[in-house]
Image: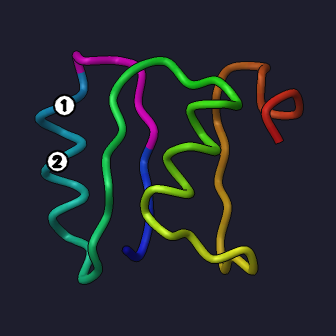
């Protein structure tokens, strides 16, 4: 697995899948609102590396709490 996208809004599904399809790697999409336990469980499920290359967070003022 090359990446994971967490998305809470169903209204962006078509655009998100179109954008993810442009990546050359394998990107997991996790739908639903994010919490720390969900993030940890998903990252473990996909076998995410502990030494990540890129982290982008934009979750409307909750970024630092989750990080």
Q: Is residue 17 above or below residue 66?
A: below
Q: Does the magenta stretch include residue 8?
A: yes
- Secondary element at tag 2: helix
Q: Residue at x 60, y 40 (%)?
A: 39
Badge 2: how crowded within 10 Å, few (<14), some, or many (20+)? few
Q: Is residue 1 magenta?
A: no
What residue did someone put label 2 on? 17
Q: How many marks?
A: 2
53 or 58, nearer to the observer? 53
Q: Where is residue 16 in the image (x, y as percent from the top left)?
A: 24, 42
Q: In this view, does 52 lie to the left or right of 7?
A: right
Label at residue 56 = none
- Tell me the magenta residue range: 6-11
Q: Quadrant of the N terminus?
A: bottom left
- Secondary element at tag 1: helix
Q: Which residue is drawn at 88% across and 33% down?
A: 64
Q: Where is residue 55 in the image (x, y as percent from the top left)?
A: 67, 61
36 or 12, nearer to the observer? 36
What residue did someone put label 1 on? 13
Q: Is residue 62 above or below residue 18?
A: above
Q: Position of residue 52 (x, y in %)?
A: 68, 76
């Amino acid at each position: 697995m090359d990446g994971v996208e967490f998305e809470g809004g169903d209204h962006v599904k078509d655009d998100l899948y179109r954008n993810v399809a442009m990546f050359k790697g394998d990107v997991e999409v996790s739908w639903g609102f994010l919490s720390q336990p969900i993030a940890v469980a998903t990252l473990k499920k996909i076998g995410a590396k502990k030494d990540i290359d890129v982290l982008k967070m934009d979750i409307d003022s909750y970024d630092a709490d989750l990080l």
